[in-house]
Structures are given as structure tokens and as C-alpha cells.
């Protein structure tokens, strides 16, 4: 599969996530963020486990738990907490800062130094999203801001570690996605029961909404997302992130009767241009050189020992 096709498929994930707000407000019972997060993650994870029929082995039990916590179990509740305590525009802007966090963590954990174009694309994308969603006089809530920032860091860390660890031999993207969704869902389950109690009564609209969120918005979208990270790299994949608030804005205009003024339209154009610029081919980012090639045998051993030490530190 060529790079353009991989980018297009990966972009479907953040585009799908942009529909979450509309589905939540139009189809689901109100004020049940943790139950919604649980239904998004656990059924989809168990379904993918049943389809792949592959369980983690060895170190991948704890690696799956860590990735599931970062990408799902911590990210979903923090995201919903920020959405409930902040105006939607503020929460979206905090989420749009994720690519910058990924760039920093990629340099630290992957040895990748992002190109100037990638950094500028991340900044321009965040600024464009700000123009689209941030309203004048938006109120700030300390807990909401902290939750929004933590959700961005959690997802960014999960994205970078997903690239760093790859996946074990014999396990496909479907299995890896199932492991993370199940681990994240199991982490959310006791918190949802403790804070929100028994599940609410569901009508046909709610069943449809939860089914869409679990199967399309989460199961399919995260499968495409994790494949994209593996093939494109953490930075390139996360630079597709602005498509989520842009999709939400388009759905709000087309289906919910929300207005788009000149500033919002200009912001959409800027964010979309930044997203495209972040995917253009260029020079390979500077990174740690491989252990073979121009290194002497002694130099190779020193670098290998250094990387082994880094892995042991991460496991603690």
C-alpha cells in the first residue's frame, strides 16, 4: 500500500472522532461520560479479541496495559472531564496541542528530531483549530484545563510508545487494538460503576449511538490509527489530529445548524493546509543511527548497551 493510501486510511480515525460530540448530544443519555467511555472501549476490545483470537504473551501483558491506560483508560475519562468542565472550544484547543507533545516525546523516546516543517505544521494546525472553535470570553476552569492538558499528554505518550514498542511477532494490528481497548475498558469499569452507578435505561436511539461509538468510532478508528502510527510514524500520524475538530465543526454546521463565520472558515483552511503540509514527503528526520553499518564493533556494543538501559528504565 502506498503512502497516500495509508495517510487517507489513517485520516479516517480523527475524522471519525470528530463525530463523537454530535452523536453524544443527539443520541445518548446526558451526563454519563464514564459509561459512554466504557461502552466505547470494552465491547469493541472484547469483539476484536474474539476475532483475532490472540492474547498477549510475556512482557506484552504489561505493555498492553500501559498502552491501554494511556490511549484509552486515562485518555477517555480525562477528555470527557475536560469537555464537561470547559467550553468545547477550549477543550479542542488543548487537544490540538497534542502534536507538539508528540514531537517532544518522539525526540526523547524515539531519537527522532522533527523537521522544521513538522513543527510549523503542528503550530499552524493548533492555531487554525483555535480560530475555528475558540469563542471570545470563554471561561477557564482549573480542573478542566488540567484534565484537558493531561488527556493530550496521555494520548501523545500512548502514540509514541505504540511506535516505540511496535507489536510482537505473530500479533496483527487487530490483536494489538483489542488488547488496548480491553485493558482501557477494564480500567474505566470500576470507576464508572463507583461514580455513576448502574447503567442508564437505553432506547433505540441510544443503542444506535453506542453501537456506532463502539464499532466505528472506536474499534475501527483505533485499528486504523494504530496501523497508521506503525507505517507513518508517531509525528506524521498525530499531525492528522486537527481533522477531528474540523470534522466536528463541519458536522455542527451541516447537521446541527451551527454557524461558521469568516474567522472559522479561515481557521479551517489554515488547519487543513497545516495537516496536508505535515504529510508531504521530505528528508528523513534525523534519528539515532542503527546499530550496524558505519559503526565499529566496539561502538555498536556501547550503543546497544545504552538502548538496553533505556528499555529497562522504561519498564520500571
Image: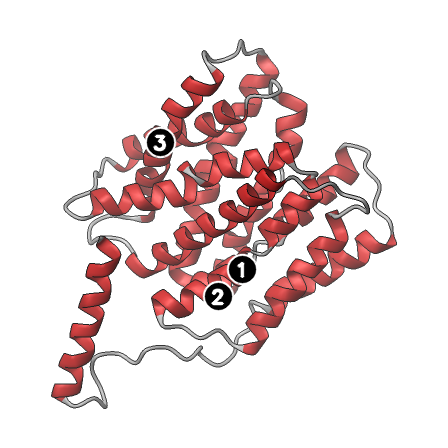
Q: Residues within 10 Å of mark 2 (few under 14, many from 20)?
A: many
2 or 3: tag closer to the N-terminus: 2
Please name the residue that numbered disc 2 is placed on: 103
Q: Which label sits on residue 288?
A: none
Q: Position of residue 123 (x, y in %)?
A: 63, 65
Comparing 63 with 87, the one in front is: 87
Check contact, mark 1 vs mark 2: CB within 8 A.
Answer: yes
In this rendering, the answer to whether 209 lies above or below 146 is: above
Q: Quadrant of the N terminus?
A: bottom left
Mark 3 crowd level (few <14, some 14–19, many ≥20, 10 Å Cα): some
Q: Nearer the viewer, residue 271 or 172?
A: 271
In the rendered image, which quarter is residue 23 located in?
top right
- Which residue sits at x=44%, y=44%? 222
The residue at 73%/40% (across/down) is 139
How far, Cα to Cα, is label 2 from label 3? 27 Å
Q: Position of residue 164 (x, y in %)?
A: 32, 61
Q: Which mark is residue 99?
A: 1
In the rendering, which numbered label is found on residue 187? 3
Residue ID at (68%, 45%): 90
Q: Earlier in the sequence, mark 1 or mark 3?
A: 1
Q: Nearer the viewer, residue 43 or 70?
A: 70
Q: Give me the C-alpha separation between circle 1 and circle 2.
A: 6 Å
Location of residue 244 with respect to 236 vertically, above or below: above
Q: Tell me residue 134's x, y (percent).
A: 75, 48
Amino acid at each position: 500500500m502506498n503512502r497516500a493510501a495509508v495517510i487517507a486510511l489513517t485520516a479516517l480515525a480523527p475524522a471519525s472522532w470528530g463525530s463523537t460530540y454530535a452523536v453524544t448530544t443527539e443520541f445518548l443519555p446526558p451526563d454519563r461520560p464514564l459509561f459512554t467511555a466504557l461502552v466505547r472501549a470494552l465491547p469493541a476490545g472484547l469483539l476484536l479479541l474474539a476475532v483475532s483470537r490472540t492474547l498477549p504473551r510475556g512482557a506484552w501483558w504489561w505493555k498492553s496495559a500501559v498502552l491501554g491506560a494511556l490511549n484509552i483508560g486515562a485518555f477517555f475519562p480525562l477528555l470527557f472531564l475536560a469537555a464537561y468542565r470547559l467550553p468545547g472550544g477550549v477543550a479542542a484547543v488543548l487537544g490540538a496541542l497534542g502534536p507538539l507533545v508528540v514531537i517532544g516525546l518522539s525526540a526523547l523516546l524515539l531519537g527522532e528530531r522533527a523537521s522544521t516543517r513538522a513543527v510549523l505544521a503542528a503550530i499552524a494546525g493548533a492555531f487554525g483549530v483555535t480560530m475555528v472553535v475558540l469563542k471570545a470570553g470563554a471561561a477557564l476552569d482549573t480542573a478542566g484545563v488540567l484534565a484537558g492538558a493531561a488527556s493530550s499528554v496521555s494520548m501523545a505518550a500512548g502514540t509514541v510508545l505504540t511506535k516505540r514498542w511496535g507489536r510482537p511477532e505473530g500479533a496483527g494490528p487487530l490483536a494489538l487494538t483489542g488488547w488496548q481497548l480491553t485493558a482501557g475498558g477494564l480500567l474505566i469499569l470500576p470507576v464508572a460503576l463507583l461514580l455513576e452507578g448502574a447503567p442508564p435505561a437505553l432506547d433505540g436511539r441510544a443503542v444506535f449511538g453506542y453501537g456506532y461509538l463502539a464499532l466505528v468510532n472506536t474499534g475501527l478508528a483505533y485499528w486504523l490509527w494504530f496501523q497508521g502510527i506503525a507505517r507513518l510514524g508517531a509525528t506524521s500520524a498525530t499531525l492528522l489530529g486537527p481533522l477531528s475538530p474540523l470534522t466536528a465543526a463541519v458536522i455542527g454546521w451541516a447537521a446541527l445548524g451551527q454557524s461558521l463565520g469568516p474567522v472559522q472558515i479561515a481557521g479551517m483552511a489554515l488547519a487543513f493546509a497545516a495537516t496536508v503540509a505535515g504529510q508531504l514527503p521530505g528528508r528523513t528526520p534525523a534519528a539515532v543511527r542503527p546499530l550496524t553499518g558505519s559503526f565499529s564493533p566496539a561502538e555498536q556494543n556501547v550503543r546497544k548497551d545504552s538502548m538496553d538501559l533505556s528499555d529497562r528504565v522504561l519498564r520500571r
